[in-house]
Image: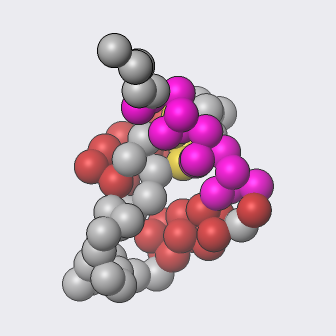
Amino acid sequence: MVLADAGYWHQEQMENIVGRGIQVLIPPDAATRKGARPGWDGGPYAFMRRVLATEHGGGLYRKRQALVERRVSP
C-alpha cells in the first residue's frame, strides 16, 4: 500500500501503481484547502475522497502520519 500526502498526487503514476496490484491512498486535496481544486472533481478525485472519508480509509491514512512524521523528543 502507498500512503502519501496530497503533494504526491499524480494520477498517471498512481494508475501505474494500482495496475501492479498495489493500493494507493493519496488525498487529491491538502487538508487546509477549502473545497476541491477547480477542475479536480469527479472520477479518481471523487473516488479517493470517498475512500478517505470512510472509517477504514481514514484510519489507514492517519497511520501514515504516525509512521512518516514521527516526532522525536530531544
Task: Kindly report the secondary structure that dominates the magenta region of the rendered protein.
Answer: helix
Residue shown at 60% from the left, 62% from the top: 52
Q: Is residue 61 magenta?
A: yes
In the foreground, 38 or 35: 35
Picture quarter with the C terminus: top left
Identify the coloring: secondary structure
Residue drawn at (66%, 45%), measured in percent from left and top? 60
Compared to residue 44, the image places residue 3 above or below, namely above
Residue 34, percent across and down? 32, 82
Q: Is residue 68 left or right of residue 18?
A: left
The correct choice, above or below, for 26 with respect to 45 in the image is: above
Q: Residue furthest front?
A: 74
Snapshot quadrant of residue 48: bottom right
Residue stretch rendered in magenta on the structure = 56-69
**Quadrant showing the N terminus:** top right
Q: What residue do we see at 58% from left, 47% from top?
A: 62
User: Is residue 49 something one can see in this rendering?
Assistant: yes
Apparent side of residue 33 relative to residue 68 in the rendered image (left or right): left
Q: Is residue 49 magenta?
A: no
Residue 47, how many percent across, how many down? 57, 70
Outermost residue on the top side: it is 74
In this orientation, which residue lies closer to the viewer: 73 or 23? 73
Residue 18 appears in the picture as rendered = no
Image: 42 above or below 56: below
Q: Is residue 12 above or below residue 66?
A: below
Q: Is residue 27 left or right of residue 36?
A: right
Residue 66 x/y as whole percent: 53, 34
